[in-house]
Image (tube, rainbow, N blue to C red):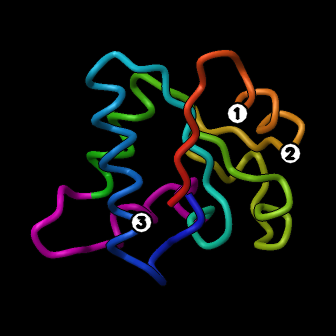
Amino acid sequence: MTAGSDAPERCNQAFTVAAAAVASGVPVSLWLTGESAWFGLPGRAKEFSLPEATPLTDLLDAVLAGGKVTVCTQCAARRGIGVDDLIEGVRIAGAPTFVEEALGEGVQALVY
């Protein structure tokens, strides 16, 4: 996901699709890049609001319960986000890990 509060509908859609996939039993690895990196921090998803949309905190909790959430290494560094700043269960990883996950057999990558 590349969108954060700067593109609220795209941001919420990415979380919605990821949460729906987890609920359907699909393995999910949600990557937070760009402005969406902020949602790896406690309380940030609670600050997000979009009318007629499921609260971002609920969607993030659903993804964390059954999938992986990763903040991009460079995006975290540019924003001064460290490992100790993250929500429990969220990790920081870089391009090699993304490529490994995205190019796995049978993997489908969606970008929002």
Q: Residue at x 72, y 28 (%)?
A: 101
Q: Is residue 88 magenta?
A: no
Q: 21 and 37: which one is in front?
A: 21
The residue indicated by pointer 1 is 102
Which quarter shows the N terminus?
Answer: bottom right
Mark 3: secondary structure: helix
Determine the secondary structure under disc 2: helix
Range of residues picked out in magenta = 38-55
Residue 53: in magenta span: yes
Q: Main secondary structure of the magenta part?
A: loop
Residue 50 marker: none
Q: Nearer the viewer, residue 28 or 61?
A: 28
In the image, 12: left or right of 35? left
Residue corresponding to mark 3: 11
Numbered label attached to residue 95: 2
Residue 27 point in image, percent of width and height: 48, 20
Type of the residue with mark 2: Ala
